[in-house]
Image: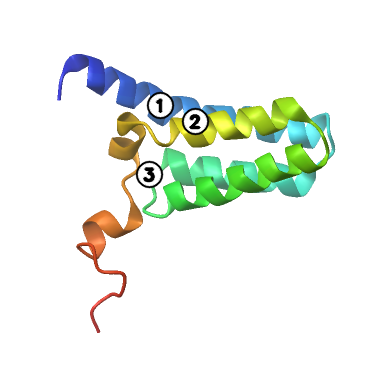
Amino acid sequence: MSALESSTSRFIAVALPVTLLVYALVAALVLHRRISAAAALFVGILLWRRHRRARFSAYIFLSAVALRGVLTHVWPLAAGAAAAIALLQLPAARRAWPSVTSARFNGDRMAPP
């Protein structure tokens, strides 16, 4: 891995949890959306700790935020969530938070008994 890839991976691994923390603060203090703020904080902590389900949790949360943005016509919210989902598709994000099935099940969907 080159130095550029390493620094990009570190940047993404820090930027996404910090962005979710900022969203949680804005959602709680300004928008009074406490459930969304708590969920953003929880997902941000999972991403920060590099939990094995963090990537999946982020996809679910960001999809819900994007859907809420579209349904309520708050386009910056929908665009921000879509941008974060696109960020999770980058190779640097895949290195920071690998897929759930990639390491554990060797491509098989079911765990061995």
Q: Earlier in the sequence, mark 1 or mark 3?
A: 1
Q: Earlier in the sequence, mark 2 or mark 3?
A: 2
Residue 102 lies, with reference to residue 98, above or below; the image says below
Do tag 1 and tag 2 residues touch (Cβ < 8 Å)? yes
Q: Is residue 88 visible?
A: yes
Q: Tag on residue 16?
A: 2
User: Mark 2 belongs to which amino acid?
Assistant: Leu
Residue 104 lies, with reference to residue 63, above or below; the image says below
**Horizontal side of residue 50 vs 77, given as left or right:** left
Name the residue rendered at 74%, 28% in the picture.
75
Q: Nearer the viewer, residue 41 or 96?
A: 96
Element marked by disc 2: helix
Q: CA distance from mark 1 to mark 2?
A: 6 Å
- Mark nearest the camera among 1 and 3 is 1
Q: Which residue is mark 1?
A: 12
Residue 28 in which image quadrant: top right
Q: Which residue is mark 3?
A: 50
Mark 3 neighbour class, 10 Å CA radius: few under 14, some 14 to 19, many 20 or more? some
